[in-house]
Image (tube, grey):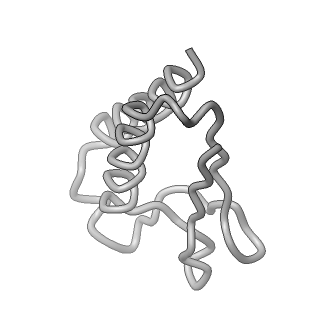
Amino acid sequence: MAIITLNRTEKLNALTHEILHRINSIIEDIRKSDKVRAVILTGNGKAFSAGTDISGEVPQIAEVEINLMKDRNTQACVNVLD
């Protein structure tokens, strides 16, 4: 089992472009391991995640790209279970 913990409590674990890329990279590494059969994505503090952080660099990124990254991360999590 692998646990990915969002730890940006001052922003209620809001997701930035960098965080999404880091999650994607971690999930890709997990996919390469045959030891991991489950992934838990959790958040520190009082919120799992407030969603996308629109105060940083994210507004400059096309919403389509953000949705594609989320879809790839979701699919990668599903593929880990296959």
Residue 47 place in picture, x, y as percent: 73, 67
Residue at 53% x, 31% y: name it.
77
82 left or right, relative to 47: left
Residue 1 sits above or below residue 55 on the image:
above
Determine the residue located farthest toward the front in the rendered image.
35
Toward the right, the furthest residue is 46
Query: In the rendered view of the protein, which quadrant contains the N terminus?
Result: top right
Q: Position of residue 67 (x, y in %)?
A: 40, 35
Q: Count up the numbered dots.
A: 0
Left or right position of 80 against 28: right
Q: Quadrant of residue 48?
A: bottom right
70 displayed left or right of 60: right
The front one of 45 and 11 is: 45
Image position, residue 35 (x, y; %): 54, 35
Q: Nearer the viewer, residue 17 or 24?
A: 24
Is 32 displayed left or right of 40 in the figure? Answer: left
Q: Would you identify the image quadrant in which residue 16 lies?
A: bottom left
Residue at 34% from the left image edge and 31% from the top image edge: 68
Image point (39%, 29%), residue name: 72
Is residue 20 shown above or below 8? above
Which percent across, then down, holds residue 5?
59, 63
The correct choice, above or below, for 49 with respect to 62 in the image is: below
In which quadrant will I find the C terminus? top right
Direction bottom: furthest residue: 10
| Residue at the image point whose x is 57% and y is 56% from the top | 4
